[in-house]
Amino acid sequence: MKLMKQHILFDLDDTLVYCNKYFNLILGEFFENMQEWFDGHSLTTGEIREKQLEIDVTGVNKLGFASHHFPQSLIDTYRYFSGKFARSTSPEKNLI
């Protein structure tokens, strides 16, 4: 029986280790806001998280890593659920 070698890589440079906590804080706040904005639609944190991750990974796969992908994935996630629940994305209408 031939054993396959496996490798484990750790990328612990300052950008990932230092910034990861901020990504988690931003995502947590985003999920809370989304649940507030879509109150009454039975939208779960898990559903929001899955869609945001799907959108973010798709963007990275298409265009590679770029600083604008993460914030754009939040915007696109909001737009996705706005379309799904026929909620206006107009800032003026959402201030009420």
Image (cartoon, rainbow, N blue to C red):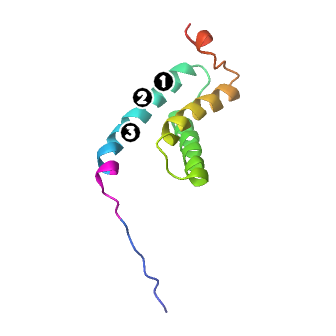
Quick check: is 13 in the magenta stretch? Answer: yes
Query: Disc 1 or 3, which lies upstream in sequence?
Result: 3
Tell me the distance, in whole angstroms, between the alpha carbons under discs 2 and 1: 6 Å
- At 53% across and 34% down in the image, what residue appears? 74
Q: Which mark is residue 24?
A: 3
Quarter that holds the C terminus: top right
- At 41% across and 33% down in the image, what residue appears? 26
Amino acid on which the number 3 mark rests in the picture: Asn
> Residue 32 at x, y = what percent?
46, 26
Classify 90 as above or below 83: above
Magenta stretch: give its range: 10-16
Q: Which mark is residue 29?
A: 2
Classify 87 as above or below 96: below
Tell me the distance, in whole angstroms, between the alpha carbons under discs 1 and 3: 14 Å
> Residue 72 at x, y = what percent?
54, 36
Amino acid on which the number 1 mark rests in the picture: Asn
SS category of the residue bearing label 2: helix
For mark 1, what is the residue?
A: 33
Quick check: is 74 in the magenta stretch? Answer: no
Amino acid on which the number 2 mark rests in the picture: Glu
Dividing the picture into quadrants, the one containing residue 86 is top right
